[in-house]
Amino acid sequence: MERRLFGTNGIRGVANSELTPEFAMRVGLAVGTYFDGGRLLIGRDIRLGSQMVKRAVEAGLISAGATLYDAGVLPTPAFQYATKHYGLDGAVIITASHNPPQYIGIKVTRSDGVELPRREEIKIEEIFFEEKFRHVAWNSLKEVKKLDGVLDVYLEAVKGHVDVEAIRRRRFSVVVDPANSVGVFSTPRLLRELGCRVYTINAHIDGTFPGRPPEPRPENLTALSQTVRSLGADLGVAHDGDADRTLFSDETGYIPWGDKILALVGRKMLEEDSGLLIATPISTSTIVEDVAREYGGKVLWTRVGSVVVSHAMVESGAKLGGEDNGGLFYAPHQPVRDGAMTVALLLDLLAKEGKSLHELLEELPKYYIVKDRMECPMELKEKIVEELRSRVSGERIMTIDGVKVWFGDGSSILVRPSGTEPIFRFYAEGKTPEKPKQLVEEYKGMLKEIISELKAS
């Protein structure tokens, strides 16, 4: 059985039970060995276990000969930008992003701030499991150096990609919900520097996330929606636990999924660059492809996962990427999810269009979306996907991650296995409310039939 440390976004586990100080120190040793010591940035989020894990990881990294630059407690994208800006060899970021409060995590990036590709993670895993650790001599051990000014450098870089004066002239009123986490350091300050009137909720730092769950989903953001409406604000902003993802509330309190924001930003960029390539996972709404086609652009479909999107952008030269969960990737800044950059880009768009977010959303193609899931045995997943591929038909079929089928009436369905749970996920969309419901029921029935046949064989 394959032994793995890394999941889809770094190493994750429950603090002090799965991800213990002893485990974290060995991860630090493995990462430090992989970088042959190296000059590495280290930083963390505000979770209750993050300081403990950070110190343990630091011990392992120092033992392996690393020179560490401590950037403190900040959003993940700030650490990623600083790694590139200061010419460091990589970064180790202690965060569990959107996971529940009890989780903690360890991300490893390369010199450009992008998380390591799978082939490089395997090298760290081999060092870890085979204990091929590098230990330097006592007189080669280095003290951790404090790296000040990271937030200043990061926010100046964000502002450098938008028309600051145009945004200031609009004097937007914005409500920010940073989920009691690190987004409070970046987004309210950025908005004030852009001339906005800023209100905050869930803005005191608390690693138990008392205000709401750290994942920004529409159903978790009722307070933001209500506050925007009550104050008559122009916009609401909600981040996840490490502020690399952003969902918005329009002035009516409506909270769209991130692929609609991707479509709006993409449309504006396409007006200036008709050959624009947009990278996005196969789970993203067809809205993005509709907009790209209308303006002469193209979509590069990828497997699901932010790291996959980042590497696809680097390899293809795509300037824009995005996910339905609120992750937006703007390569002229950095090809990773970046919450503050997403906020600035949307404000720039609103300022230049002279319209509200609600008005712009109304201009997009209309799709009705249904998401569902179904349990299945882990050991049958590959065979189920293989069998499903042989049974489906449609106008276009893509099998880079599960099976996605597009139909002539504009509807589509994606059926893909979870990478970590014994379930299949269904993402269906159509031009009428009934169509995605019909597709989900049809394909759930097909999957049940396949599972039954495989179990009987």
Image (spheres, rainbow, N blue to C red):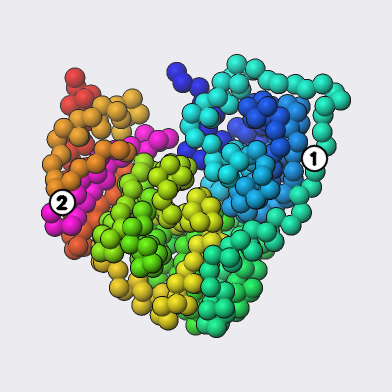
- For residue 205, say whether it is visible: no
Percent position of residue 91, x then y: 64, 41
Disc 1 crowd rating (10 Å Cα; few below 14, some 14-19, many 20+) is some
Most foreground residue, 336 or 112: 112
Q: Residue at x 45, y 18 (%)?
A: 1
Q: Which residues are magenta?
A: 402-424
Percent position of residue 14, x then y: 59, 38
Name the side, left or right, on which 266 lies relative to 9: left
Q: Is residue 251 above or below residue 315?
A: below
Residue type at mark 1? Val
Quadrant of image for the C terminus: top left
Q: Residue at x 83, y 37 (%)?
A: 143
Most foreground residue, 264 or 180: 264
> Image quadrant of residue 54?
top right
Return the residue at label 2: 407
Return the residue at label 1: 144
